Amino acid sequence: MTATPPVVQVRDLQKSYGSVEAVRGVSFSIEAGETFALLGPNGAGKSTTIEILEGYRDRTGGEVRVLGVDPHRGGLDWKARIGIVLQTSNESGNATVTEQLRHFAGFYPHPRDVDEVIDAAGLREKAKTRISKLSGGQRRRVDVALGIIGRPELLFLDEPTTGFDPEARHQFWNLIRGLKAEGTTILLTTHYLDEAAQLGDRAGIIVGGRLIDIGPLDTIGGADARVPVVRWRDGNGLVREERTSRPAQVVADLVASGKGAELEGLEVIRPSLEDVYLSLVRGHEATAAGNEAAMSAPEARPDPSRLTDKDVRA
Ligand SMILES: Nc1ncnc2c1ncn2[C@@H]1O[C@H](COP(=O)(O)OP(=O)(O)OP(=O)(O)O)[C@@H](O)[C@H]1O
């Protein structure tokens, strides 16, 4: 039996823009049918990574395979197998939504039905409207519709729901769940951690061009980052809390010690993906800042006049 190769393989990817090292040795892979969320603060290197995988940007170093092909050399056949929703919308023309989708459907060998895509993207009421007359959020839906019209095997979604109202975002999640059910592999970047939690199977967290954690969404940050907190108000109205891996036991003990009295403000708070992400990123940034301060402290800087042969060899 031969195992299916990963749809995306990235090894030691590097990209510099002049003196800016945007991506510094990132490695990950995405299996067929998986939704992988690439998360990280502004400027972390997500779009740069995704654009290299899409074939829009050259890399400085490392190995990349997307659907078995080096994106740098991907031809039209390869391009027809991927769908792309870029971070910024390019759609503003005079064509109507239906015309634009029909036009793009013509580029692909097995496109989806245009009306089906219009419904799935929540664009039925705007199907005959010129794209230039749409709101920002509606235009973003057109971007998503154009990204999936070619029935891609692999879909890149770079901050796809920016500007969506809450209802549109939920509608979009359903659309993506449908694509997942059909076996589409998805690479998603988003600043909405609830979106990543809803859609992702695995996530990678990138900070300063480096991947600081990767794994299934329910393991990101490690078990310790997921320990729940029991919070309540004591008899004097003071907020009390206890971090515990046995919240039911803590609640039972509290109830027993209160002789059955109602516990004011009792909550069991389980850290969300956003909580875990924030503590990871803040922890990493604090460590990086500490290292930088240590390196710039006078005692940390070697005095060149005192360097020995041993230091030079090291
Ligand atoms: N064309 C470019 N020329 C020079 N520097 C660039 C260019 N594009 C990106 N950068 C720099 O590379 C770094 C990574 O940028 P990138 O857009 O990949 O980050 P990002 O994680 O996608 O951020 P955001 O969440 O804000 O979209 C940043 O420091 C950015 O300023």
Image (spheres, grey):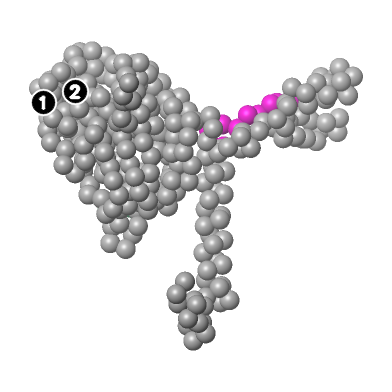
Q: Is residue 267 magenta?
A: yes
| Picture residue at 9% right of the left edge, 22% below the top | 106
Question: Which quadrant holds the N terminus?
Answer: top left
In screen coordinates, is 124 left or right of 224?
Answer: left
Expressed as whole percent of the image width and height from the top left, the position of residue 273 reads 53, 33
Q: Amino acid at mark 2?
A: Gly
Vertical position of residue 108 compared to residue 214: above or below: above
Q: Are marks 2 and 1 in contact (CB under 8 Å)?
A: yes
Q: Which residue is mark 2?
A: 150
In screen coordinates, is 275 left or right of 18?
Answer: right
Q: Which residue is mark 1?
A: 107
In screen coordinates, is 14 left or right of 203?
Answer: left
| Picture residue at 23% right of the left edge, 13% below the top | 116
Residue 259 badge? none
Callout count: 2
Q: Which residues are magenta?
A: 266-275
| Picture residue at 78% right of the left edge, 23% below the top | 249
Q: Secondary structure at mark 2?
A: loop
Q: Secondary structure at mark 1?
A: loop
Q: Check disc 1: other Cα within 10 Å, few if <14, some if 14-19, many if 20+.
A: few
Q: Is residue 68 visible?
A: yes
| Picture residue at 58% right of the left edge, 76% below the top | 299
In screen coordinates, is 244 left or right of 280?
Answer: right
Vertical position of residue 48 compared to residue 16: above or below: above
Q: Is residue 10 magenta?
A: no
Q: Amino acid at mark 1?
A: Phe
Vertical position of residue 229 compared to residue 149: above or below: below
